[in-house]
Image (cartoon, rainbow, N blue to C red):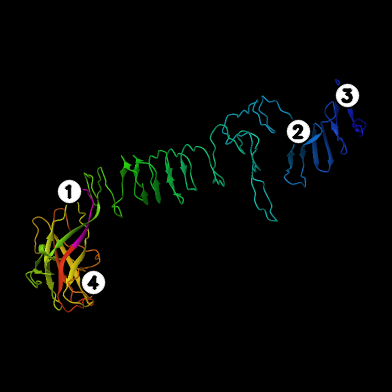
Amino acid sequence: MTDIETEITNSIDKDGQTVWTGTQDSNGNKIILDVDGDSSITADTDDVIDIEVKAVDAVKIGWQSVANTGFISIDPAAFTADATENTHRLAMLNSNAITIPTGTTALVSAVYLTEPNITATGTVTTAATMYIAGAPSEGATNWALWVDSGDVQFDGALTVSGTITGNLTGNVTGNVTGNVTGNVTGNVTGNASGTAATVTGGTQASITSAANLVTVGALDSGSITSGFGAVDVGSSAIDGGVITAATNFAGPLTGNVTGNASGSSGTCTGLASGNIGKSTIFVPVAAMLPTVSNGCAAIAQAATGAGQPDMNVLDFDGTSAEYAQFQVAFPKSWNEGTVAFQAFWTSTATDTDGVAWSLQGVAVSNDGTIGATYGTAVVVIDNNISAANDMLVTGESGAITIAGTPAAEDMCYFRIFRAVSNGSDTMAEDARLIGIKLFFTTDAGNDA
């Protein structure tokens, strides 16, 4: 190696120190820094400065055509650390303070990174401001990134391809897609989705929206508000909480309900143990009378055979409209909504001709006029099944709107008739009515 001292010009000696002035050219040769000669600075490759420590190029400054290197690359020599001390390949320490003068400084940090400023004339598959290639595997616990203390802020979106394990404390606003294993404590605002959205434990003060919620244990306290989809608790209980809907529940509530329920529409209060939803009343012809005008035949008793059930029937003509009437005082638990009906009837004929049964109703309140106009009639069609005196049961009719704006404790008058003008009513013989089943909906467990 050329002794650099022979290349130095314009040098002076002052107080035992050598001072260089002017430009010095080492021409790619090493400047040895330590006694044993294994730490040096050199630039034997054009535009790349090597800092050698312990006979290894520990730091390279300059662009290199080598994979996974940067303008500054650090790769020190192997080292045996002190077993009792924390050891790091790169440490940013804060022994000496940064003093901020009077005024406002927007940001102070230990490490500041900006995006890499890429001019992409080719294709860049993935780019990042900071990239961590992997986590260690030698520790009892291993992390690729460890924030030991303090809050972490992400102003942009956070994408996690793997599993988040541990506790999340605080508010999470936005969408969480995937499975959450563990307890969620606090409020969750946003959407949760999954093929099995199962809550196995935890405390939730307010759940405001969910498509489907399946619980394993009891659903205790808190509230379930409108916007919810199905809530399936299986054999578990909903205890001590409040279920609130903006108007009415869209579907039936099946099972026993203990507690109080209230609402401005479809009000039900003082709820006791009982069933709420669709209910039925059977009205036999013995509870009906032919109407004074255009009434059907009077009730008749027809024998079927010795020791066999007799039939109580009202006969309806096949050529002219004939009517029968009955009235029902529905329980207070009725929601005063629409009703439906199912006709039970028979025939003396053995054909397969059709009959069109029709029902209409009107509600009359206390001190109201009984001479009121019936609502729109609803028709249900049924056919004979080639045998005389067989029990024939229609399907359930469509919804019947009862005229008169029904209210609690009203008397509801119904008129049933055979709609002989309907094209599906083709039976020439009398149709014999045995009775009807009325379908109605309750929104309270009792009439208290």
Under tag 4, what secondary structure? strand
Question: Would residue 440 be counted in the magenta stretch?
Answer: yes
Q: Nearer the viewer, mark 4 or mark 2?
A: 4
Q: Which residues are magenta?
A: 437-448
Placement of 295 over or under 128, stated as above or below: below
Q: Nearer the viewer, mark 2 or mark 3?
A: 2
Front in this rendered view, residue 383 or 59: 383
**Would you say 168 lies left or right of 215 here?**
right
Q: Which residue lies under the disc numbered 1?
A: 447
Does residue 210 appear anywhere in the picture? no
CA distance for labels 4 and 1:
35 Å
Split into 4 quadrants, where in the image is the N terminus? top right
Three-letter amino acid code at the position of disc 3: Asp
Q: Mark 1 Cα within 10 Å, few/some/many (few <14, many 20+)?
A: few
Question: Would residue 408 be counted in the magenta stretch?
Answer: no
Q: Which residue lies under the disc numbered 2?
A: 78
Residue plotted at (7% across, 71% down): 293
**Would you say 250 lies left or right of 360 here?**
right
Q: Position of residue 406 (x, y in %)?
A: 17, 57
Under tag 3, what secondary structure? strand
Front in this rendered view, residue 11 or 155: 155
**Would you say 398 lies left or right of 310 here?**
right
Residue plotted at (66% across, 53% down): 125
Residue at the top extreme, as displayed: 15
Q: Position of residue 440 (x, y in %)?
A: 21, 58
Placement of 82 over or under 246, stated as above or below: above
Label located before the other in sequence (1 or 2): 2
Q: Which residue lies under the disc numbered 4?
A: 382
Circles 4 and 1, Cβ within 8 Å, touching? The answer is no
